[in-house]
């Protein structure tokens, strides 16, 4: 028989950004919290094998490119020497320092952390497989934050070390000469940016008719143009039908509109989305409804069909983004403490940290068209931004969509250097109910990339002087 070792007022299952934020918020609100994490460190996919390590590698890629491209403007560096062991060690040191920070926050808040794989055994108990054996925890309320995992294509040879998922790609174990990326979404293109800079020859195969299919085409075009010159192939409307492990490489066969002949690659990264972990946590023993894909349905308070059990993050639905999980985690924690909190954010921004970066929020133009919403649109070209030109780049764009009748901001997107940083202003403007006039009358410092958002608004209000727009 398992010994009941612990009681938790709030049990949080999963220690990624959503889970640790929920645990910390609940503790700050006076709850006695047990946080369960299957890995020895906190931070989940985002910190250990996702957002953070990828951004470290992308920064290295940016330095390599900038140094190379500045030759055109009079500063020439020698060809870089790439020491992947050192880059990997640097990347790991960043993760480790944040892991250590989180461990400190757990102690400061007196959260009990248990490392082991947890599964529900009833609506009030979880069993945790720890190094010392099974531990049972009885809880009053629970928050499920058990995340997602990479989607696998069953017929591919998954035991071959040359077939990668995003975790493998982030290991930076080697730089393959020829790398195929299956899936032209965010993970695929971020990893393409990294490995291209490190010297791999990149091919991308994407099922849909554009890369990053969820984003408006005009925002994707500057990236598509740039990588068309850099990468060996970008096959759109094409998919992989088989991957055969041969001694000299992985032999890949394709099907679709632009399908090439089968070809050998030194490594293949599969980045075709992620699957929620809802079917792996014993949810049925707690009576929690999980759909066949593994998503758990929740209400605006993050409550599942079981009144005292909440769920947040990737496991409750798309978009699978850390910043969404964190906000949902705080809502769930506040509700466990009796607050009347709701998840009522107007938008969740998306960023592809490619080069150039692409960021968007609110309504996309595709959605506005599909929903028959009347809008005014402005697109400010960064070729007219002094700051962008000083960075040696001119392909960027800032687009805003405003409600036709009221001028209220509906959506915005940016492509260009640091677009991922710039989008936050648009998110704040949307949350505050700003209209084009509010944005155009907000004094943006000059010269900055941020002022392109103000210029786009001035294009809507008709007050722009930095461009000439014929009446
Ligand atoms: P994704 O959904 O962004 O992209 C997957 C791509 O693969 C899509 O373009 C899809 O059309 C394509 N695809 C699907 N099946 C295919 C097939 N058989 N052959 C060829 N192409 C195929 O998924 P992802 O890039 O794997 O990322 C997974 C999740 O992680 C997403 O929710 C993403 O938002 C998140 N993520 C976010 C960031 C970020 O915020 N910067 C970074 C990495 C991952």
Image (tube, helix red, strand yellow):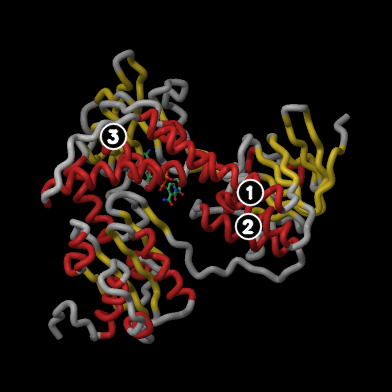
Q: Are marks 1 and 2 in contact (CB under 8 Å)?
A: yes
Report the Cα–Cα distance between label 1 and label 3.
Answer: 35 Å
Q: Gap between marks 2 and 3, in whole Å?
A: 37 Å
Q: Which mark is residue 120?
A: none
Residue 427: x and y in percent read 44, 69
- For residue 329, the mark is 2
Quarter of the image with the C terminus in it: bottom left
Q: Quadrant of residue 164?
A: top left
Disc with the residue nearer the chain's start (2 vs 3) = 3
Which residue has dot 1 on it?
A: 145
Residue at (23, 44) in percent of width and height? 65
Answer yes or no: is residue 83 visible: yes
Question: In the image, which disc is placed on residue 198?
Answer: 3
Could you tell whether 284 is left or right of 375 in the image? Answer: right
Q: Residue at x 29, y 60 (%)?
A: 415
Q: From what the image shows, is residue 417 above or below residue 86?
A: below
Q: Position of residue 205 (x, y in %)?
A: 29, 38
- x and y percent of residue 116 in the render? 69, 34
Q: Quadrant of the N terminus?
A: top right
Assess disc 2: are there few (<14), some (14-19) or many (≥20) residues with their C-alpha within 10 Å of its C-alpha: many
Classed neighbour count for the residue bearing mark 3: other residues with Cα under 10 Å, few (<14), some (14–19), many (≥20): many
As displayed, is residue 470 above or below residue 273?
A: below
């Amino acid at each position: 028989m398992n010994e009941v070792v612990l009681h938790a007022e709030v049990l949080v299952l999963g220690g990624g950004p959503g889970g640790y934020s929920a645990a910390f918020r609940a503790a700050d609100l006076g709850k006695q919290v047990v946080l369960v994490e299957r890995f020895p460190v906190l931070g989940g996919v985002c910190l250990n094998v996702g957002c953070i390590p990828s951004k470290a590698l992308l920064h290295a890629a940016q330095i390599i490119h900038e140094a190379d491209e500045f030759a055109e403007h009079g500063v020439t560096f020698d060809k870089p020497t790439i020491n992947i062991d050192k880059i990997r060690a640097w990347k790991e040191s960043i993760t480790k320092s944040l892991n250590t920070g989180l461990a400190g926050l757990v102690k400061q808040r007196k959260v009990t952390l248990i490392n082991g794989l947890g599964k529900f055994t009833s609506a009030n108990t979880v069993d945790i497989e720890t190094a010392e054996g099974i531990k049972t925890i009885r809880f009053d309320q629970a928050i499920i934050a058990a995340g997602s995992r990479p989607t696998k294509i069953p017929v591919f040879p998954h035991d071959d070390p040359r077939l990668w998922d995003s975790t493998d790609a982030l290991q930076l174990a080697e730089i393959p000469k020829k790398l195929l990326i299956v899936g032209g979404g965010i993970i695929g293109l971020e990893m393409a940016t990294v490995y291209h800079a490190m010297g791999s020859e990149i091919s991308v195969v994407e099922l849909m008719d554009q890369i990053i299919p969820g984003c408006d085409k005009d925002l994707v075009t500057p990236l598509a143009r740039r990588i068309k010159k850099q990468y060996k192939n970008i096959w759109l409307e094409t998919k992989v039908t088989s991957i055969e492990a041969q001694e000299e490489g992985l032999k890949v066969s394709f099907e679709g509109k632009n399908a090439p002949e089968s070809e050998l690659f030194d490594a293949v990264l599969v980045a075709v989305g992620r699957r929620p972990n809802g079917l792996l946590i014993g949810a049925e023993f707690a009576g929690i409804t999980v759909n066949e894909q593994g998503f758990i349905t929740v209400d605006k308070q993050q409550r599942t069909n079981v009144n005292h059990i909440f769920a947040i993050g990737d496991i409750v639905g798309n978009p699978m983004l850390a910043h969404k999980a964190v906000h949902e985690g705080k809502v769930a924690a506040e509700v466990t403490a009796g607050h009347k909190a709701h998840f009522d954010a107007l938008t969740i921004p998306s960023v592809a940290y490619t080069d150039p970066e692409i960021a968007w929020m609110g309504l996309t133009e595709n959605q506005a068209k599909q929903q028959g919403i009347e809008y005014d649109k402005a697109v400010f070209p960064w070729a007219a931004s002094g700051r962008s030109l000083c960075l040696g780049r001119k392909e960027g764009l800032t687009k805003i969509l405003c409600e036709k009748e009221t001028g209220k901001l509906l959506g915005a997107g940016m492509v260009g250097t640091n677009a991922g940083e710039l989008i936050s202003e648009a998110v704040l403007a949307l949350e505050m109910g700003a209209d084009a006039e509010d944005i155009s009358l907000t004094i943006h410092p000059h010269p900055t990339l941020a002022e392109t958002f103000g210029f786009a608004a001035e294009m809507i209000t008709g007050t722009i002087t930095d461009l000439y727009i014929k009446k």
